[in-house]
Amino acid sequence: DAKTTQPNSMESNEEEPVHLPCNHSTISGTDYIHWYRQLPSQGPEYVIHGLTSNVNNRMASLAIAEDRKSSTLILHRATLRDAAVYYCILRDILTGGGNKLTFGTGTQLKVEL
Amino acid sequence: SAVISQKPSRDICQRGTSLTIQCQVDSQVTMMFWYRQQPGQSLTLIATANQGSEATYESGFVIDKFPISRPNLTFSTLTVSNMSPEDSSIYLCSVEASSYNEQFFGPGTRLTVL
């Protein structure tokens, strides 16, 4: 399985944008890039996913490098509720319906007033 | 989306005993999974619960230790057998419907083994 590399932790101030990087230099052409986050004492929740083009939803934006070897999750205005561990995960499109999620160590995001 | 509940939410058990964790989904789903999250660690997949057939276990996990049932498309159980303190973890159920491209997770079961 292609692996991802993320910083262990990042800090942000409330109301400011946050850019969470993820490197996936061995990504294959059929790998989707997925992001999940885990709030304290909760199960992970889906944030966003993409294949090649940048994606936006109500929670975040996903910027994917042209060579697809890296991506960035963008929270446009961080709030205290966004403090969580953010996981960048690759999923093979060919087996996406039944493929497991392989969680790395993720990035612990701390948001301060 | 899918709403998932787990029972119990937490438990404290004695060494050598077994605990069965239930996972209930509010809609029929194709795929159900069981994960373990050890203290301070990330999630690790234990197995895929297959409806009507034996679960598919990941490397390092065996059926005798973690028997799984999936009698229908909305329910599954995970049993942690012959527990030791090393089994103290959060156990999470997740689901994925064939029409979605995301997994939904339950709130987890926090298990402490003394």
Image (spheres, coloured by chain):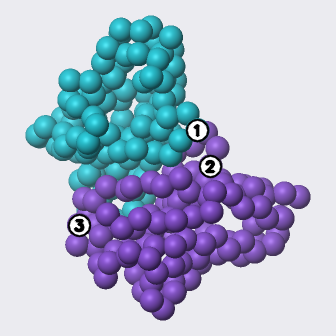
Chain colours: A purple, B cyan
Res. B40 mark: 1
> Mark 3 against mark 1, which lies toward the viewer?
1
- Residue positioned most to the left: B53
Disc 2: CA contacts within 10 A as few (<14), some (14-19) or many (>=20): some
**Above or below B97: residue B87:** above
Give x and y (percent) for residue B12.
51, 14
Q: Are dots 2 and 3 in contact, CB under 8 Å?
A: no
Which of the 4 image quadrants contains residue B40? top right
- Residue positioned most to the right: A113
Q: Amino acid at mark 1?
A: Gly
Give x and y (percent) for residue B89.
48, 29
Return the chain for callout 3.
A
Q: CA distance from mark 2 to mark 3?
A: 28 Å
Q: CA distance from mark 1 to mark 2?
A: 13 Å
Return the chain for callout 2.
A
Residue at point 28% right, 37% down? B60
Of callouts 2 and 3, which one flags the residue occurring earlier in the amino acid sequence? 2
Q: CA distance from mark 3 to mark 1?
A: 30 Å
Instruction: Read off the residue under disc 3.
Output: A95
Q: Amino acid at mark 3?
A: Thr
User: SS for tag 2?
Assistant: loop
Instruction: Read off the residue under disc 2.
Output: A39
